[in-house]
Image (cartoon, rainbow, N blue to C red):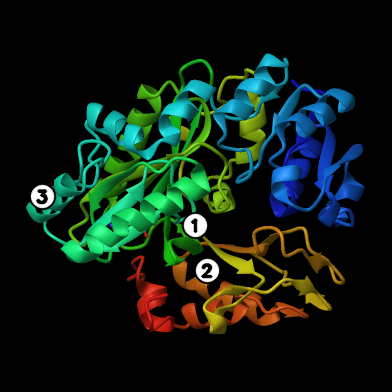
Amino acid sequence: MFQRILVANRGEIALRVIRACRDLGIEVVAVYSEADREAPYLDLVDEAYCIGPANAADSYLNIPRIISAAEVGNVQAIHPGYGFLSENPHFAEVCRSCKIEFIGPPQDAMRRLGNKNEARVLAKQVGVPVVPGSDGLITDENAALRLAHDMGFPVLIKAAAGGGGRGMRVAHNDLSLKAGLKAAQQEAEKAFKDGSVYLEKYIEQPRHIEVQVLADRHGNVVHLWERECSLQRRHQKLVEESPAPNLPQPVREEICAAAVRLVREANYYNAGTCEFLVDKDNRFYFIELNARIQVEHPVTELVTGIDLVRAQIRIAAGEKLRFQQQDIVQRGVAMECRINAEDPAADFRPCPGTITTWRPPGGPGVRLDTHVTAGYRVPPNYDSMIAKLLVYQPTRPEAIACMRRALAEFVVEGVKTTIPIHKKIFSHSAFIEGHVDTTFIERNWMQKGG
Ligand code: ADP
């Protein structure tokens, strides 16, 4: 096992990894940008190095600076968290060539799966259904138009290198397809330095259901069941839960088996998530594989009792999985609300600033993953998430009641947060009955379509 690990991230996930290291008796080195100098979690580590200014390109995305900190800090491994360099195969390769283990998948699998178009090809090879769409990348406008007519509008233009909902456009007719192709290509070129796009049929009001997978370096692959993540704004998640409500058990089992097949075929190891869309008839389609720990991983930890971050570290150290598929059961119901410093009444605009009052909820069945304390200044430079509020209860009605109680206890002042919209969601009859899809938030609270 490693003696010392560097955490190449910030915020709640940095703290989450620090805690996992402590639980395993591993020393921790943190890195921080000038904007995070006062971050409370820096008091919990053995060493911390400033790696540059607030701008992520000069700090959390700067590979030479992070590797230098790792060398000076004398660590054996780096945990990348999520976002930043977590899905950058070049970074994984640099770490490993410096004899520092990257706590994540092999770089070859990352490279292949990081491209959504190639991931689709792989899925088709192993008989996992994908959303109907182009066979490969779209290079020619006329070919795109022909395909859209064959499939029928609406269609979705997607960036092969896409992520975080960027480089995606819905097209309802020829005109919007032509304009959307250009816009998506430009956006993808700017965001990912790769403007390649492909077409998918736009699935009307789908559910987003994803499967957590763990694979060790000895060929063992297991799934940890699914998470329902349909509650999104601008294709970004707000609420997650496990198990997915109203999902027939045979469909659940099929989706999970498909995820395992895919991960096995990709020669993948460590933690990963296969994302699927599920239509009204419970047909499911693979959309992408996320090669990292995800924001919503605690939902799965609560229902399975498996600590995913500890599992990631053990896998990276070469250990075999400590459980087999039949040992992994979903027990009870877990739900997560993402608390962002955003104004839900103003189209979810980020709302950085100083938190003047911070009264977090607690009590039975509540888990709060956060790096925030009273007086904390939310920097404007990074993602606006300030906390993940989770509940864990024997049944879904009890989980909903518990979340409502926890949301009512939670007082944050100084910045606007997503707490008010979560209160609305957890009082909405369709949500309470488990009838959700990815357009739920837009339909109910973002009249203009977000
Ligand atoms: P990203 O990597 O940018 O997050 P994804 O491919 O994971 O993009 O898709 C994000 C979200 O976009 C999905 O959860 C879903 O809400 C929506 N989406 C993606 N593909 C489709 C599709 N073919 N039809 C309808 N909605 C889709």
- Measured as percent of width and height from the top left, residue 346 is found at 55, 82
| Callout 2: SS | helix
The number of numbered discs placed on residues in the rendered structure image is: 3
Q: Who is closer to the viewer here, 10 or 450?
A: 450
Q: Is residue 189 above or below residue 207?
A: above
The type of residue carrying mark 1 is Gly
Q: Separation of disc 3 and disc 1 at Cα?
A: 48 Å
Q: Residues within 10 Å of mark 1 (few under 14, many from 20)?
A: some
The type of residue carrying mark 3 is Arg
Q: Which residue: 69% across, 45% down? A: 57
Using the rendered image of the protein, determine whether residue 129 is visible from the camera's viewpoint. Answer: yes
Q: Quadrant of residue 17?
A: top right
292 relative to 282 in the view: left or right: right
Using the rendered image of the protein, determine whether residue 208 is visible from the camera's viewpoint. Answer: no
First in residue order: circle 3 vs circle 1: 3
Q: Which residue is mark 3?
A: 146
Tag nearer the camera, 3 or 1: 3
Q: Separation of disc 3 and disc 2 at Cα?
A: 48 Å
Q: Which residue: 35% across, 79% down? A: 443
129 relative to 216 in the view: left or right: left
Q: Which residue is mark 2?
A: 399
The type of residue carrying mark 2 is Ala
Q: Quadrant of residue 180?
A: bottom left
- Measured as percent of width and height from the top left, residue 262 is found at 35, 30
Q: Which residue is mark 1?
A: 332
45 relative to 437 in the view: left or right: right
